[in-house]
Image: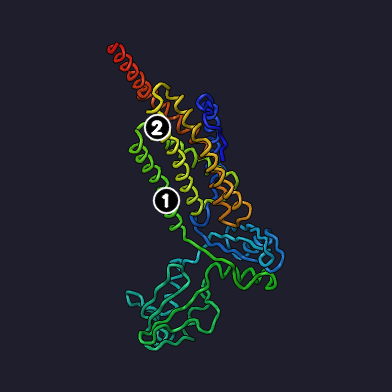
Amino acid sequence: MEFIKPGRQFDFMGKRWIALGISAALLLVSIIAFFKPGPQLGTDFKGGTELEVAFLQPTDAGEIRSAVESLGFNAPDVIRVKDSGAENAHRFLIRVQEVSALSDEQKEAIRQKACVLPEDGAVSPDFEARCPANARASEIKFSPGGDKISMRYETEPDLAAIKAQLTGITGIELRAGENNPVVVSARDHKVEAQLKSRGDQLLDGLRQKLGADRVPERALRVEWIGPKAGAQLRDAAIRSIAISIVFIMAYIAFRFDLRFAPGGIVALVHDVGIALGAMILTHREITLSTIAALLTIVGYSITDTVVVYDRVRENLARHRNLSFPAIVNLSVSEMLGRTIMTSLTTGLTMVCFLIWGTGVIKDFAFALLIGILVGTYSSIYIAAPFTEWIDRTFFGGQTTNQKKVTRTKAVKRADAVV
C-alpha cells in the first residue's frame, strides 16, 4: 500500500516556522499546566491506600465520600470506574491518604500491652500481676506493611491473654478469625497476630455506614504505599527519563554526527512535555504506568527520528548538488509513507485500548496515543529542521560548503583534462 507516490516531494522546511510556533505554544501550555492545575499524582508517588470496590447496589459517589470522611479519613478521592459487565456495575475507586504502617506511638503502645521489658529494665509496680510469664513477650517485630506482628515468648504462650492485650489499642484492630493470633513455631514459642489494614478498616466502616446490603465483604483490589516510598519512586521515575535522554543523545552523536544529536533530544523533550501536559489537562493520574508510557514514547519517537536521520545521511552523499534544506525535504518525503503506515497502525491499536480498555490501560493508551501523534510530527518538523539550523549556525553550513568545494574540485579536474 502506497500513501505517497514515488518521486513526490513536499516543502516541509518552508513551513517549519509555523510548525515551530505551534510546538512552542503547546509546550508553553504544558509548562503552565504543570504548575496550575498541576499533576494529579497517583498513590504510587504520593502514598496512601487505594481500594477498588464493587458495590452491591447503586451508590452515589458523594454519599461514599461523606461516609469515608465520617470514619476519620482525610481528603478522600472517590472515582467511579466504568464497567460494562453486569457483575461489577457499581465499581468505585476509593483513595485515602492514610496508610497501614504503624506509627511510633502505636508501636510503643503495643509493646507496653504485650509486656515487653524496656531496655532500662524499669517496670510499673503492677507489671508482675498484669503480665504473667506466658503472656510476656521477650521479642516483638512489626511488618513493614503494618498488618502483622511477630512475638516471641520464653514459655508456651497464652493466646487468649495475648488477644486480650492487643484489643482496645487506638487505631489497632485484629482481623476476625479463630486462629488470630496463632502459634507459628511451637519450639521457639513464636506467635503472629494479623491486624486489619487501613483498607479493611475502611471497608468495615463503609459497611456500618451504608449497610451490609450495599457494601461487599471484600474489595476487588487493595493497594497501599508509604509517602517515603512514593517519593523514592517519583525521584527514580524522573531519573529514569533523564538518563534515557542522555544516553540517546550520546547514541545519536556516535551513530550519526554531533550536529544530529541536539535535534533528536529537542524532539524527545517536545514529545514527552506535550504528552505529560495532555495528561495533566485531562485530569489523568500520573502513576508508574504513565512513566512507562512516557519511556515508551521516548523509544518510539527516537526510532522514527533515527529513520529520518538515516535517510538524510544517505541523501547527503547521494545528492551532492542539493542544499541541506532540500535534502531534508527529500528525505522526509521519501520516508513519509513509511511514517504514516507505522503511526497509523500503532495509533489505531491505542484507540482500541482507549475505547474498550479499563482503568490504567486507558491512561497508558491515552499517553501513548498523544506520544505517537507528536512523535510523528516532531520527526518531521522539529528534529530535521533543528539539525539544519545547528549545521548552519554552529558549523557554518559545513555540509553545504563541503559540497561546493567538491563541485569546484571536480570542475578544476575537468578543465585540467581538457
User: Residue 238 location in percent, x, y?
Assistant: 43, 48
Compared to residue 153, the image places residue 47 above or below, namely: above
**Residue position for label 1:** 235
For image coordinates 54% across by 42% down, the residue present is 341
Observer-nearest of 397 and 48: 397
User: Residue 120 location in percent, x, y?
Assistant: 32, 74
Observer-nearest of 360 and 382: 382
At mark 2, the secondary structure is helix
**Residue position for label 2:** 314
For image coordinates 53% across by 47% down, the residue present is 368
User: Residue 99 location in percent, x, y?
Assistant: 50, 63
Observer-nearest of 20 and 175: 20
Compared to residue 340, the image places residue 99 above or below, namely: below
- Can you say which quadrant of the picture contains the N terminus? top right
For image coordinates 41% across by 77% down, the residue present is 150
Residue 291 numbered tag: none
> Horizontal placement of 41 versus 211: left or right?
left
Amino acid carrying mark 1 in the image: Asp
Q: Earlier in the sequence, mark 2 or mark 1?
A: 1
Observer-nearest of 415 and 141: 415
Q: Residue furthest left?
A: 416
At mark 1, the secondary structure is helix
